[in-house]
Image (cartoon, grey):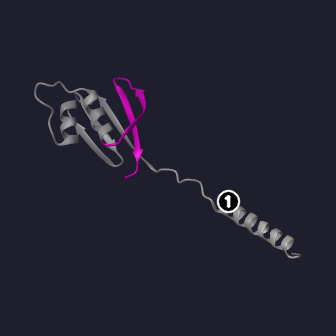
Amino acid sequence: MRYLPIVAVLTLAFISFTWFAGAQTTQSPARPAWEYATFYMGPNVGFSAGVIQGKREVRGENLAELYKNLTGTPLSPDKLASEADVLHVLGSDGWELVSVTDGPWTPTFYFKRPVR
C-alpha cells in the first residue's frame, strides 16, 4: 500500500513522457508535388495552337489538328473545333485550370496536376 503513490506517479510520468515524445515526432502531411501545363493560341505565321507539358510540347496548325495530336483521334468532320475541346482533353487527363491570362491576341490557359 505504501508503494501505490509511487507507482501512480511513475505511471503518470511514463504516460506523459510517451505522449510528449509522440507529439514531437508527428510530421506534417507531405505537400504534393505539382507539374504544370500551358495551352496557348496565337497568330504565329497564320494560326497555331499548342500545349506545353513540362519539356513536351504538342502543336497544331489549328485547334482540330491540336486535338488530334493530343488524343490521336480526329474530331468528327461535322464538328468545328473549339478551345472547349482542348480544355476537355486536358481536364480528362487530370489537369486543373488555375489561371487564364489575356494576351495580345488570345488567352493563355495555365494548368496544374499532382506529379504522376
Question: Can residue 43 be seen in this snapshot?
Answer: no
Is residue 107 magenta-colored? yes
Q: Nearer the viewer, residue 32 or 100?
A: 32
Q: Image point 21% across, 41% down: which residue?
A: 71
Question: Can residue 105 be seen in this snapshot?
Answer: yes
Dividing the picture into quadrants, the one containing residue 57 is: top left
Per the picture, the main secondary structure of the magenta-coloured stretch is strand
Q: Which residue is mark 1?
A: 23
Q: Nearer the viewer, residue 73 or 3?
A: 3
| Magenta-highlighted residues | 93-116
Residue 83 image point, x, y percent: 28, 28
Q: Nearer the viewer, residue 2 or 102?
A: 2
Q: Residues within 10 Å of mark 1 (few under 14, many from 20)?
A: few
Residue 102 image point, x, y percent: 40, 25
Residue at the front extreme?
1
Residue 4 image point, x, y percent: 84, 72
Residue 1 shown left or right of residue 51 in the figure: right
Residue at the right extreme?
2
Q: In which quadrant of the rendered image does the N terminus lie?
A: bottom right
Number of labelled discs? Answer: 1
Hey, what amino acid is under mark 1?
Ala
Dividing the picture into quadrants, the one containing residue 5 is: bottom right
